[in-house]
Image (cartoon, rainbow, N blue to C red):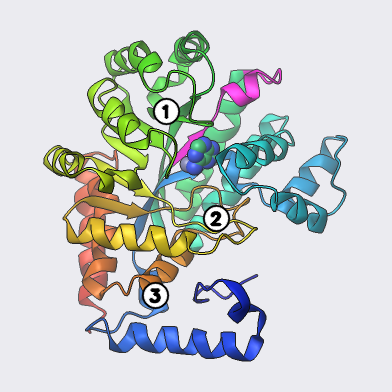
Amino acid sequence: MLEPWHVPCSGDAMRDPALSSLLIFAGVALSRCCAGAAVTPEFIYGMPKAELHIHLEGSIDPEEYIGLVARNNLQSAYGTAEAVRLRLRHATNLDTFIEVYQEMLASMRTERDFHDVALACFEHLHAQHVVHVEMFFDPQMHTTRGIPFSTVMEGIDSARSEAEGRLGMTIGYIMCFNRNRTAASAMEILEASKPWLPRILGIGLDNNEEAGFPEKFKGIFARAGQLGLHRTAHCDVNQAHSVDHIWGCLQLLGVERIDHGVNVLDDPRLIETVKARRIGLTVCPTLLYTEIPGRLEFRAKAIKRMLDLGLLVTVNSDDPGIMRGLYVSDLMAKVQVAAQLSRDDVVALARNSFLISWIPDSERKLDLRMLDDYVASHPQ
Ligand code: ADE
Ligand code: ZN
């Protein structure tokens, strides 16, 4: 497991322990002297923050997967956590990522499984000073395996109430429909979800970015609006037609947030529109098991640019189980070093997470006050 304030670096330098320690030391020292006021990893970890882009299914880590496979007497091609980690190296782009995501989530069968996976994830987030979570889940990826929707909902909802009571967090769920499936299949789930709607915050879209996205979901998003649900959609980084897809989500689906949305920066009119409409951008500067040189740095610099433009950007964990076990504070610390964020920048990331969250205004006020108190009690 990497140190939480491990400096991102690619290529040969990371294979040389002496050089890599020097780089780590230099990165931390730089982050303290060049960005104006001191920004330490401890300050970043301790900040109260919201997590708005994390997938229940993507939080299953290799050890958890092995445990679920054994508990459910399932056949698996991967007998040890190490073998699972090797398999996760296959994820190098969105399509291969979804292949391993599907394999990992197939280990969940029972209400208890859904409960345990969600609760373990909330415990990880609590340890990173997350006080509010909006968690994605993918009902179609379970109902199509024969798991009843009620099994998923009962499991995750009991985890929510346990975490809220024991850890003092506030938690909501976002039901994600798969972009590569039909609108009819999404509508079926949306209608079936009605008994649970008071416990669902909103809807989203994820999975492979293809086949009629976003137009085909117009009716689903209109219906979700009638049902009083919030609306967001993934627009993954550097996909074919990323800019058009973001425009489509804004103009046809009426989204309040875009998940990832880094390609907003490719179109000045999009930047203006996203800023004027106060659209939240939940960016995920994650690291895959197979290192892709420059990936983290590209996303970190995009985050810095969004902050400089006054956009409502946040840092998020996405799929920590599949992405080296790194959660939001780990990632914020990496972004701080990679893009030389100032103390004001990192505080803005936490502030944005509350500003664009879907909590009632009374709670938002309390969370923002908690953040202000934290900053005031950590003088520069
Ligand atoms: N499913 C889980 N994480 C995802 C992501 N970042 N993009 C698309 N689908 C996903
Ligand atoms: Zn995601």
Among the 4 quarters of the image, the one containing residue 368: bottom left
Q: Amino acid at mark 1?
A: Arg
Instruction: Tell me residue 220's x, y (percent).
Output: 38, 14
Q: Secondary structure at mark 2?
A: helix
Front label number (2 vs 3)? 3
Residue for badge 3: 337
- Residue in front for this viewpoint, 171 or 313: 313
Front label number (3 vs 1)? 3
Instruction: Tell me residue 360's x, y (percent).
Output: 24, 39
Instruction: Tell me residue 276's x, y (percent).
Output: 11, 40
Using the image, tell me which numbered label, if any, was put on residue 365: none
Q: Which residues are magenta?
A: 135-148
Q: Is residue 367 above or below residue 145?
A: below
Let me know if residue 144 appears in the view: yes
Instruction: Kindly identify the residue that appears in the image at 33 percent across and 63 percent down.
Output: 301
Instruction: Kindly identify the residue that appears in the image at 22 percent across and 40 percent down.
Output: 279
Neighbour tally class for label 1: few under 14, some 14-19, many 20 plus, Cα within 10 Å: some
Residue for badge 1: 199
In reply to whether residue 136 is colored magenta, the answer given is yes
Residue for badge 2: 123
Q: Amino acid at mark 3?
A: Val
**Mark-to-mark CA distance, 2 and 3:** 26 Å
Number of marks: 3
